[in-house]
Amino acid sequence: MAEAAAVPGGSLPHGQGSALRRMLANRRVVLGGAVLLFFALAAVFAPLIAPHDPVEQDLLLQYAPPVWADRAEPGYLFGTDNLGRDILSRLIYGAQIALFVAVTAAAAAGLLGTALGLLAGYLGGWVDTVISRLVEIWMAFPAVLLSIVLVAVMGTGLHSVIIAIAAIDWTRFCRVVRAETMAQKQQDYVASAVTVGLGRMHILWREILPNVLPLLIVLFTLEMGIAVIVEAILSYVNLSLASDFPTWGTMIADGRKYVNQAPWLMILPILCVIALVLALNALGDGLKDVLDPVMRK
Amino acid sequence: MAEPALLEAAGLRLSLPDYSRKPPFGAAPTVDILHGIDLALAPGDTLGIVGESGSGKTSLGRTLVRLYKPTAGRILFDGQDISGLPEDRLRPLRARFQMIFQDPQSSLNPRRRVADIVAQPLRLHGRASTATEARKQVDALLERVALRPAHGERYPHELSGGERQRVGIARAIALQPSLVVADEIVSGLDVSSQAQILALLRELRQDMGLALLFIGHDLSVVRTVCDRVMVMLNGRAVEQGDCAAIFAAPKHPYTRRLLNAIPLPDVDPDWVARTAENELGETLTMDVKDSVALVTGANRGVGEAFVQALLDRGAAKVYAGMRDTGGYEAPDDRVTAIGLDVTDREQVAQAAAACGDVTLLVNNAGVNHNQPISADMAQQNAREEMEVNFFGTMEMCRQFGPVLGDNGGGAIVNMLSILARVNLPMIGTYCASKAATLSLTQGVRAELAAQGTLVVAVMPAAIDTRMGNMNPPPLEAPADVANAALDAVEAGEEDIYPGVVADGVSEGLAADPKGVEKQFAEYLPG
Amino acid sequence: MSAARIPPAGTPGGSILSVRNLHLAIAGRRRHTPILRDVSLDIAPGEVHGLVGESGAGKTMIGKVILGIQPSRARITGGSVLFDGADITHLSERERRRLMGRGLGLIPQDPMTSLNPAYRIGGQIADVLRLHLGMNRTAARARTLELLHDVHIREPERVLRQYPHELSGGMRQRVSIAIAFACRPKLIVADEPTTALDVTVQRQVLALIKQMQAQEGASILFVTHDLGVVAKICDRVTVLHGGRVLEAGDTRRIVEASQHEYTRALMAATPRHDRPGDLLQPVPETLTARLDEEALAYDAAYAAAGTHDG
């Protein structure tokens, strides 16, 4: 309709290469990505940048306030906690755990959910019926309760937390991927792949999956945000790592007891959780805007 | 057919699950899409499949290339039955029949470059072993469809509609198939790109000796591409043959409607007005001459008169249906007596199977107990009258509807009575059954309009038969009623009132229905 | 025959709609992309005016400008649209609302998108009547039934209570025709109203549009790519390419003895079932290339002139 002045054959190819350019033009992607990168760098280089050992106690230095308060202790940017441990170092190591859980749990949930979703959506029939019913029954359980029960059964620890999150949230991937696969299956490129003589699994993995991928990237990002929160909740109720290990959730739980004397003990880890989750959500939403038009247009 | 067919389909049926009505557990109910399609295509031949939305043309194309598995019937490709072949045994054959899809936007994987899309069949079927060799062939194919090698580097969404369809064609011809099914491949294009694509298709067909199955909704396009054509309606082929013959003299009313509906670029200000006069398109009419008729209740009264009138007008064959054929003497050797009790569903179904050539159905059988509603037997009378007059007619229409459709539309004549429009108190149950049958007739008319079946309701006053009647005089001669009914068939009239009495009553009803009702209520038979 | 009641072309005084030298461009980050270039057309009262062109010709955009629904990035860079003698290109939202319905109506290409799927048919027609004509509930219902009857809907009472998705494409298009004519507008923009329909339904819908138009005396701007439809329903035609008017005139003259090479090429590219022997002639690429060049040359000239005229 609106291409009157377009010179025939003159349009420039704008495929994969420009997807990156459009991502960089999206404010939410850039902002979310920057914050995520900040936390990721902190996590990766934690041993190098953390000024102190996160578990080292110094009972002479309890409740040192952050630098912006009076009586601040030099060398302890965000102050110390009830046992005199350096808050900044604990936050940095906490980011390590938060991101590790986020990535592995989201990946595990994504792999399981995507595999089942692809099969259900593409094969249909009884496979679809079985998987869909399983998802429905699964989703009928309250998520937080289920995760607590799972960790309680498997015993506390990081691996339990990851398994619990994956076990709960694979349904999210499964449902979305199933619906998208069914929509893609209706597209004639799938029919034409059949007429060319491609096998079913080849079509599913090589033709359909690449078209579902952008959606998966978005889902994965959002799922990471959810995993960060669930991990924080589980460590808050002491079902994650042993309490001397610095996770943001444990820090919040510990800080709660001293909220009157030293509010920063609780506020700083909460701010970290909020910042990371907001960043992941912004990134996910931004990516959705950037990646979708390529699919649909 | 002298040449052995490349593609042959016989009695092809297809049912697909309707997921919109799927219950939470268990299988989805199925919908019948194709009702027995026969076709044959010789090597290098072109067959156009034409129909409107819902006709099943796309499903037919997809079944022929085995994207769907037919529920019944055979598909022979080069002599081999592929209708039930599992996918792994079908795969080597697939190289020989390819499909071009309607919407190139959706039929090209948006995540692949054009060169990859065209190369895919080549690599898969071992026509190109290395990437460079594939690329060489791809460039040749792109050039073949008037695209530049540079187009190979692009993604489908970077191409125009016409260019995308060229890519679809390049992929379809990559394996040098002997058959290509083209499904509505120009329907989304401007006339100029449409003309280019059609020219390209013609060229390729001549160069490669392709057989082409061209599916489309536009008869003009099909005419320019194909030698033979098949017109589809509701999953059936209503007409099939050489384009030249069918376009010059379409036999089926639906084909005529389709042809007449196409606005040719000739100035004709009255063209639309001609439609406005008859909302449903042209009037349905039918020649009684050379027709094959079936008359129920043919051994007496009006039925007998119908048989005679049909013979007089040159009907090719008349099936004379009656409960008991014993003692029936056929007036002509064109008449075949068949035992048929319209209240017996099985017998009706058998008749429909046995008389598959019927083009004109006369539902004449009826009973009249001539009893008032106050009679002791009124309940039983009413049931019997409904059984024969209503349910009998209904079953006949139900079973013969598809037969008439297969035979080009045809006509149904339902013998009713003026008493279908107004009640005579002394035979109230009979009147009610006729009124119900009139309503049924309207329903049948609506349902069968699309397949081009004319449905006539005949509503005479009293007829002078040997059966006796309590209607008011004067009595009509049976032959007059039968001839009036056949006139209506030939003229395409839907409701007729033969005789002065019936005519008068119908006019009275139009002017003052309450007055007519009162008049009839006061009438007490002799 | 119908040409007699139409005043000769070029009499803006007698026109219900007069598009004068309209220029429109889509604003981009770096530059404006011209879409319409010096478009002029006149529609007399009671005239059915065809606007023909291929995709990208700008025909839909003209309809949108008339209705005031052009995209927000579209800038009218010159010219005017006179409806009933008054310029309607820069109306306030309030004035525009008053004009819609009573002055202007629309028959869309896809009625599914113009009918609200959440409301019953009866309510949607009645709303239009109550909004523009201030009818009360009873009057609106009576008029709705009358309209549905006019567009040959067999059971208006039943259709009144149905939702858009319960109707077939043809029925939906009948309903949108009823809505377009509901407030007796003077001009209706019909934007490819039959493109999505089957041919047999198309014929009925065309007949209906023509019949309603004759009954109500409205003018119609009939946007289409189909020369066949134009030949059957339009009194006069304007042929567009690349946002430029190539020629305009009486339908018979355009269809039978066109002055412009492009129109003749379009005719030659249109398949017809009654002339199977003729090979279709694709529109020559040299011709389209030349037309594109002309358009670009015009842009340059217009831009240069614009700096002087102000």
Image: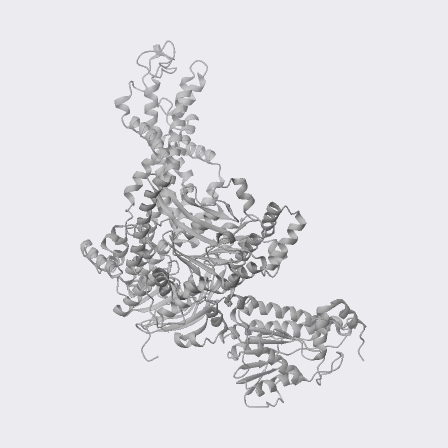
Does residue C194 appear left or right of residue B382 in this picture?
Answer: left
C295 or A145, nearer to the observer: C295
Q: Is residue A38 visible?
A: yes
A153 or B196, nearer to the observer: B196
In the image, residue C176 sits, relative to residue B310, either above or below, namely above
Residue A223 locus on image (x, y percent): 39, 36
Residue C59 locus on image (x, y percent): 42, 53
Does residue A130 appear left or right of residue B347 in this picture?
Answer: left
C174 or B140, nearer to the observer: C174
In the image, residue B302 sits, relative to residue B155, either above or below, namely below
Does residue A77 appear left or right of residue B153 in this picture?
Answer: right
User: Colour scheme of this structure image?
Assistant: one colour
User: Residue C27: which quarter of the image?
Assistant: top left
Residue C152 locus on image (x, y percent): 58, 61
Q: Please report the residue visible at 60 percent of the width from the left and 45 percent of the height from the top.
A: C131
In the image, residue B174 sits, relative to residue A46, either above or below, namely below
Does residue C32 appear left or right of residue C120 in this picture?
Answer: left
Q: Please report the residue visible at 39 percent of the width from the left and 76 percent of the height from the top.
A: B244
Total tally of numbered discs in the picture: 0
Residue A112 locus on image (x, y percent): 37, 43
